[in-house]
Amino acid sequence: MGSTLGFYEKVYRQKIITLNHDLNNDYLMRYVCAHELGHAVLHADANTPFLRKNTLFSTDRIECEANFFATQLLLYDKVLEDYETKFDVLRESGIPYEMERFL
């Protein structure tokens, strides 16, 4: 899959999330899966563009919505006040620092 981290597609009413098997970081794999799950929930009928490292910075509406979904899902049980900075909670949760804007 090269630089493609993952993607979501819907084929014959079946929702499919594909992750790059070369992802060697469990945190990145969780984030990519949560991002693609966001597409499956929020954009169920759209086959989304491939998530590449550079799309983490995307300003495209559906990519931003999936990033927001993933960040909120992975921070669901966190109390942000327990952390000194936003980056501390992102680091501990394995969320890319670029998602700081969604806190």
Image (cartoon, rainbow, N blue to C red):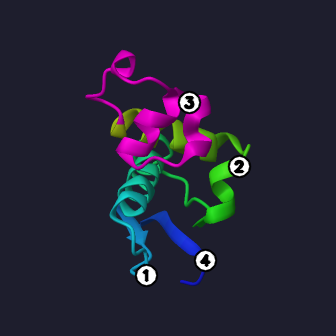
Chain-order first, disc 3 or disc 2 = 2
Residue located at (55% from left, 54% from top): 46
Distance from disc 1 to disc 3, alpha carbons, whole Å, reads: 27 Å
Q: Secondary structure at mark 3?
A: helix
Left or right of residue 55, residue 67 in this image: left
Report the residue at 62% width, 31% height from top: 101
Cβ atoms at labels 3 and 2 below 8 Å apart: no
Whole-angstrom CA distance, mark 4 to mark 3, is 24 Å
Location of residue 32 (image quadrant): bottom left
At a point 30% along the width and 27% down the height, the residue shown is: 78
Q: Which residue is mark 2?
A: 58
Q: Which residue is mark 3?
A: 102
Q: Neighbour class for label 3 at 10 Å: few (<14), some, many (≥20)?
A: few
Pointer 1 or 3: first along the chain: 1
Report the side of 101 relative to 95 (left or right): right
Residue beneath disc 1: 22
Residue range highlighted in magenta: 75-103
Numbered tag placed on residue 65 in the rendering? none
- Find residue 75 and report its image quarter: top left
Which sits earlier in the primary sequence, circle 2 or circle 4? 4
Cα–Cα gap, marks 3 and 2: 13 Å
Q: Nearer the viewer, residue 103 or 88?
A: 88
Residue lying furthest left: 77
